[in-house]
Image (cartoon, rainbow, N blue to C red):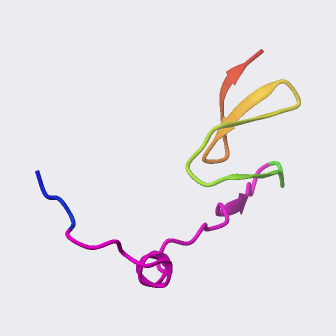
Amino acid sequence: MAHPKRKISKTRRDKRRTHYKATAPTIATCPTTGENHLMHRAYWHEGKMYYKGQVVMEA
């Protein structure tokens, strides 16, 4: 197993981590209901589950 010979400084560690960024989730608007939802996810609206603008399931 690899074992470092020297301690990596905080600056060097942080330089490496600058590329790890949190991204906001992509939100889409349904053409049928006008509801905002996460992309590629089914969502509930008025007792019905929609996916790609079509009713998939009713409660």
Magenta includes 8? yes
Q: Residue at x 34, y 71 (%)?
A: 7
Q: Which residues are magenta?
A: 5-32
Q: Horizontal placement of 22 versus 7: left or right?
A: right
Q: Please state the total of marks drawn on the protein image.
A: 0
Q: Magenta part mainly helix, strand or loop?
A: loop
Q: Residue at x 63, y 38 (%)?
A: 42
Magenta includes 10? yes
The residue most toward the top is: 59
Above or below 45: residue 33 = below
The residue most toward the left is: 1
- Residue 4 x, y percent position in the rendering: 21, 66
Residue nearest the viewer, comparing 1 with 6: 6
Q: Horizontal placement of 40 versus 6: left or right?
A: right
Q: Residue at x 56, y 72 (%)?
A: 21
- Residue 11 x, y percent position in the rendering: 49, 84
